Amino acid sequence: MTLHIAPPHDTGYAALELLLGLCAVSSLVLLAAIIGLEGLVFRRTLPGARAWRDSLIVNIASSILGVPIAWYAVEPLLDLDDWLIYPFLVITWGLSVAVEGGILKLLERHLAWRKIFVASAVANLLSYVLMMAVLLLSTSVALG
């Protein structure tokens, strides 16, 4: 006999499910915006590249690789002073540039490393600006 236990909905479980669902949807919308933004950068800076395809592939790959880093780094970061988040952002930006640049080089072998590095650095800088703007806006809305 299997006993199925579900938390009662009056404990806030339904609200938690709704919140997690909204976070997942908003994360996908943000990822789509980042893919579009980086696609525009690649289109302008990498002649002959398949900008939209490349942006989709490199961002999905870096997101998959970034999930474990974010998962294990979030809790320790919450205990740090606010200013210590900035070195972490610089490190994750550098990792994003390296991962996306490396994959981009595999996709576009005919392009020079320098062009790929510059495109990846600029695209990720703009993506981080977008992510920080969304984070700051959502935090200010949540706080009041």
Image: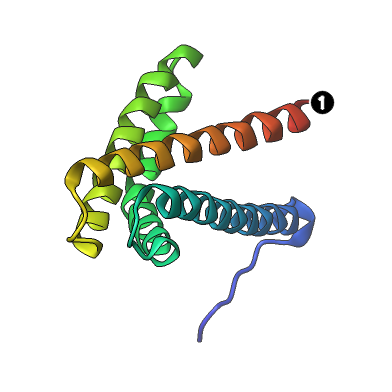
Where in the figure is residue 133, as x and y percent of width and height?
62, 32
Relative to 134, residue 78 above or below: above
- Residue type for callout 1: Gly
For the point 26% across and 48% down, which residue is it? 101
Relative to 76, residue 33 above or below: below
Which residue is more in the foreground, 7 or 35?
35
Extreme bottom residue here? Answer: 1
Where in the figure is residue 55, as x and y percent of width and height?
41, 58
For the point 74% across and 51% down, which residue is it? 12
Where in the figure is residue 138, as x and y percent of width and height?
69, 35
Which residue is more in the foreground, 98 or 43?
43
Where in the figure is residue 49, as x and y percent of width and height?
33, 61
For the point 34% across and 52% down, which residue is it? 46
Q: Residues within 10 Å of mark 1 (few under 14, many from 20)?
A: few
With 104 as the anchor, is 123 left or right in this view?
A: right
With 137 as the anchor, is 98 left or right in this view?
A: left
Q: How many marks?
A: 1
Q: Which residue is mark 1?
A: 144
For the point 38% across and 47% down, which residue is it? 45
With 115 as the anchor, is 19 left or right in this view?
A: right
Which residue is more in the foreground, 29 or 13?
29
Q: Secondary structure at mark 1?
A: loop
Q: Quadrant of the C terminus?
A: top right
With 39 as the anchor, is 110 left or right in this view?
A: left
